[in-house]
């Protein structure tokens, strides 16, 4: 009913708007007054966590994209090697697991069969399994050694939005917590990152207030057949997620690429007026990557692409190569996906509407996939 949708036309719009609160709720009670993490709910002891020598993340769809982003944070903050694998592939390839492996199963519903089977396989091999889940008491957390709940509230729309952002928060919390208990050299950085994380909700709010041009742009592209997405570093999984949203909602051919791969094939796809969304890394910090993606934009534009550029406020270097420019707030590199994903959600939702598609219930899809 309209009341359930809180005055929005679709659950998806309501859930996009709820993201600042979902992020704040997921942080709530997990940071103490001294700015340290208190994740006592993660019932894996500090000594067991200190023994971990490998992290393996298993998930499907959007949750898999959250995992791909988490890998950057986990390896950077803990120096523990981290693999990310599609849950549907995992148990069929005889993965190497033992008591020192921490498997993180990410699932909004907690009922995804592929993810459940992957975690069962991991536990049979002696690995510890931590679930990151949005649904209290669902099967995946019940069968795991420990759970860290995302507090996004019920997500009704088939296309995941607020669950994704809170999965990222939960992954960052786990990564920082591992760093904290293990006292890795990044320990000092932890407090600064936690402060930055606490700001993200407000930044997402700001992004949401500037979405009208994105909606207009989406409507103007409703007749297109293909949209490509480019990103690198943590922006690469954001590109994959932007493409997945467009497939699910707009039923368009949409594909995400690592920008560095362009020359190895995808650039052959570029033709006149092809929309290409580019997620630009921050010009600060890893500025090499920023400069490389600016030259990618130059290359594809020279071949006719219409660039839709998502870049930080104040990044002037992108301006000459952007046919459309979507600004996002300045954030630390590893946290950028949380603000960069939001315009892509809005873009896909508006394109779906413009194409006359059912936003909350896309064809052929179910909210939770309980069969293999
Ligand atoms: C997201 O928009 C999708 N509907 C889908 O990819 C989803 O993320 C995937 O099926 C995993 O679901 P889960 O998080 O409930 O396990």
Image: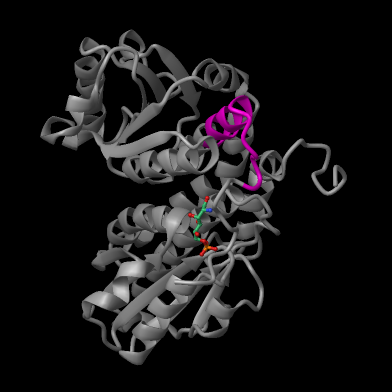
**Residue at 57% from the left image edge and 83% from the top image edge:** 142
- Nearer to us in this view, 259 or 220: 220
- Nearer to us in this view, 332 or 293: 293
x and y, in percent, of residue 130 in the image? 46, 76
Q: Is residue 105 above or below residue 63?
A: below
Does 306 sit left or right of 361 as displayed?
Answer: left
- Determine if the magenta segment contains residue 355: yes
Does 287 sit left or right of 50 as displayed?
Answer: left
Does 182 sit left or right of 145 as displayed?
Answer: left
Q: Give the range drawn in magenta.
A: 345-361
x and y, in percent, of residue 210 in the image? 61, 23
- Determine if the magenta segment contains residue 365: no
x and y, in percent, of residue 29 in the image? 65, 65
Q: In this view, does 56 lie above or below 199?
A: below
x and y, in percent, of residue 55 in the image? 31, 71
Q: Is residue 181 visible?
A: no
**Residue at 38% from the left image edge and 35% from the top image edge:** 254
């Amino acid at each position: 009913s309209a009341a359930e949708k809180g005055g929005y036309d679709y659950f998806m719009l309501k859930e996009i708007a709820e993201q600042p609160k979902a992020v704040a709720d997921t942080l709530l009670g997990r940071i103490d007054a001294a700015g340290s993490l208190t994740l006592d709910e993660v019932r894996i002891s500090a000594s067991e966590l200190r023994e971990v020598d490998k992290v393996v993340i298993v998930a499907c769809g959007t949750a898999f994209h959250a995992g791909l982003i988490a890998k950057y944070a986990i390896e950077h903050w803990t120096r523990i090697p981290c693999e990310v694998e599609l849950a549907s592939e995992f148990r069929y390839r005889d993965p190497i697991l033992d008591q020192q492996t921490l498997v993180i199963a990410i699932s909004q519903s907690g009922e995804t069969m592929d993810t459940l089977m992957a975690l069962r396989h991991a536990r049979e091999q002696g690995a510890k399994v931590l679930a990151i889940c949005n649904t209290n008491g669902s099967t995946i957390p019940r069968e795991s050694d420990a759970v860290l709940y995302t507090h996004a509230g019920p997500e009704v729309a088939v296309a995941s939005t607020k669950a994704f952002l809170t999965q990222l928060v939960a992954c960052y919390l786990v990564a920082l917590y591992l760093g904290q208990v293990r006292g890795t050299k990044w320990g000092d950085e932890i407090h600064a990152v936690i402060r930055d994380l606490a700001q993200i909700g407000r930044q997402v709010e700001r992004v949401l207030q500037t979405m009208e041009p994105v909606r207009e742009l989406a409507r103007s592209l409703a007749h297109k057949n293909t949209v490509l997405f480019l990103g690198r570093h943590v922006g690469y999984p954001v590109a994959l997620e932007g493409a997945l949203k467009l497939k699910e909602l707009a039923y368009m051919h949409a594909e995400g690429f690592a920008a560095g791969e362009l020359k190895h094939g995808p650039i052959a796809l570029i033709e006149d007026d092809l929309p290409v969304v580019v997620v630009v890394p921050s010009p600060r910090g890893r500025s090499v990557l920023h400069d490389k993606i600016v030259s990618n934009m130059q290359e594809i534009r020279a071949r006719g692409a219409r660039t839709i550029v998502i870049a930080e406020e104040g990044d002037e270097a992108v301006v000459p190569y952007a046919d459309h420019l979507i600004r996002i707030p300045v954030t630390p590199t590893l946290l950028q996906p949380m603000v960069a994903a939001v315009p892509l959600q809005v873009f896909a939702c508006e394109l779906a509407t413009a194409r006359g598609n059912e936003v909350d219930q896309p064809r052929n899809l179910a909210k939770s996939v309980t069969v293999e």
